[in-house]
Each structure stands twice: as structure tokens, then as C-alpha cells.
């Protein structure tokens, strides 16, 4: 069966986007950590005030969520680097096991935070609960398949998990666009922003899975 190569420009473009999203995610974690630690003052919007006080009231829970989240942003992209999988399989497997633990912590904490720290009310809670469940399900399915040495489905479920995990970073610029171009308050548009970000990432994940499946991309175990 003929293997059709993926254009290098496409791979490079995806790599750049992933790096940018990683930087956004890590920057958000750093800012939130410094705020919760009292190093910098909480953000107060000139019009809407301090709308994210829920994090201040749930510091431990927030740290449990965001610190593993930062590690996730660093380790997850490395799982998809062919050179690491082929030349340093031990690292791929070790970081994969670490990511499973991190993912479980992140997903469970996200479920709890959906009801304690949300800004956008029921709309945001519905989005974060649904996609946290999909994230955890994809993680567990990916782990299940690799334990059975089923590489192809393992890869596909991990792509879904990866996409949802990184959607949090995409939500940030979407929120910024709402601030810049919308008259809605954060309580009104945060939920919409989460739905847009998560749904967009899941669609892109399915498109990529289907695209690479059709090209019979070789999978290195």
C-alpha cells in the first residue's frame, strides 16, 4: 500500500501553532500562579472589575489544576515527534506514563473547577464539564489501546486528548477578541469562548486523524 507523505509546510505550520499555544498556556499558568501567591495583584478590568475571584477562593484546587497543566503543555507535544519515538522510545514511554497521571489530575480538577471557579455561568460550566469528560475518556481509551499494543487507535485517541488539552490556550485569544470587539460582559461571553475553543480543537483533531489515516501514515510504536 502506497504511503503518501504529509507536506513539510503543513507539518511546520502545525508545529508553530503548537509552540505558540504552549507558550500561551505556560504564560497563563505563570501569571495565575504569581497572582494566587500574592506576587502580583489580581487583574481588575476597568469596566467589569475583578471577575475571576473564584480562583482566589479556591487556590489549592487551582494550583492542582494549573501546575500539571503547565507540565502537560511541555511534555504532550513531544509525544508526537517522530524522532523521539524512533530514537528514544524509552523517553516516549516514560513521558507517556507521566502524561496519563497529569491528564487524570487535570481532567478531574477541571470537572470540580467547572462548578467552583467558572466566570461564564452555566454556559461555561456545560462546556468545561462536557469537554473534561471527553478529555478523560480519550486519555483512558488511549492508555487502554497502548496496553493492548493497538498503536493506531492509541494514536487517534491521544490526538483527541491532546487537542482538547491545548484548547484552553486557544480560548485565551478568543476571550481577548470578545473584550476587543464585543459589548458583552465576561459573564456573558466566557461560556461562548470556551464552546468555540473546545469545539474548534475537536473538529481539527478529527480532520487531522482522518487526513493522516487516508494517507496511511506509518506509525512508529
Image: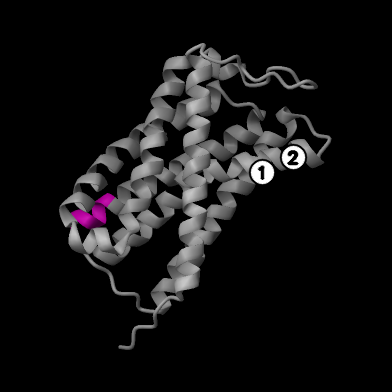
Q: Where is residue 71 in the image (x, y as percent from the top left)?
A: 36, 37
Q: In this view, does 21 lie above or below 105?
A: below
Q: Residue 154: image x %, image y %?
A: 29, 59
Which secondary structure dominates the residues rendered in magenta? helix
Taking the image as shown, residue 114 lies to the left or right of residue 134, namely right
The image shows residue 31, relative to residue 18, as above or below, that is: above
Q: In which quarter of the image is the C terminus?
A: bottom left
Toward which corner of the image does residue 135 lie, by quadrant? Answer: top left
Element at label 2: helix
> Could you tell me which residue is drawn at 66 percent across and 30 percent down?
120
Residue at left offset 41%, top offset 72%: 212
Front residue of 48 and 200:
48
Q: Mark 1 points at which residue?
A: 174
Q: Which secondary structure, mark 1?
A: helix
Of residues 20 and 148, the one drawn nearer to the viewer in this rendering: 20
Tell me where residue 80 appears, x and y as whole percent: 34, 58
Q: Which region shows up in magenta?
A: 143-149
Q: Along the line of sight, which residue is nearer the eye, 82 or 194?
A: 82
Distance between mark 1 and mark 2 Cα atoms? 6 Å
Q: Residue under circle 2?
A: 178
Residue with the most extreme bottom position: 1
Image side of residue 198 versus residue 153, left or right:
right
Amino acid at each position: 500500500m502506497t504511503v503518501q507523505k504529509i507536506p513539510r509546510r503543513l507539518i511546520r505550520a502545525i508545529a508553530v501553532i503548537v509552540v505558540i499555544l504552549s507558550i500561551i498556556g505556560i504564560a497563563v499558568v505563570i501569571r495565575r500562579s504569581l497572582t494566587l501567591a500574592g506576587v502580583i495583584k489580581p487583574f481588575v478590568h476597568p469596566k467589569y472589575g475583578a471577575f475571576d475571584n473564584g480562583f482566589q477562593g479556591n487556590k489549592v484546587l487551582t494550583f492542582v489544576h494549573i501546575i500539571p497543566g503547565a507540565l502537560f503543555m511541555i511534555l504532550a507535544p513531544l509525544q508526537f515527534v517522530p524522532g523521539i519515538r524512533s530514537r528514544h522510545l524509552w523517553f516516549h514511554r516514560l513521558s507517556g506514563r507521566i502524561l496519563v497521571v497529569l491528564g487524570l489530575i487535570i481532567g478531574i480538577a477541571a470537572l470540580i473547577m467547572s462548578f467552583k471557579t467558572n466566570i461564564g455561568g452555566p454556559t461555561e460550566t456545560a462546556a468545561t464539564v462536557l469537554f473534561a469528560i471527553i478529555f478523560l475518556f480519550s486519555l483512558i481509551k488511549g492508555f487502554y489501546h497502548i496496553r493492548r499494543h493497538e498503536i493506531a487507535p492509541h494514536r487517534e485517541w491521544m490526538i483527541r486528548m491532546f487537542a482538547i488539552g491545548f484548547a484552553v490556550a486557544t480560548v485565551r485569544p478568543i476571550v481577548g477578541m470578545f473584550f476587543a470587539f464585543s459589548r458583552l460582559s465576561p459573564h456573558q461571553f466566557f461560556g461562548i469562548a470556551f464552546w468555540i475553543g473546545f469545539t474548534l480543537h475537536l473538529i481539527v483533531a478529527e480532520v487531522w486523524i482522518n487526513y493522516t489515516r487516508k494517507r496511511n501514515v506509518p506509525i512508529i510504536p
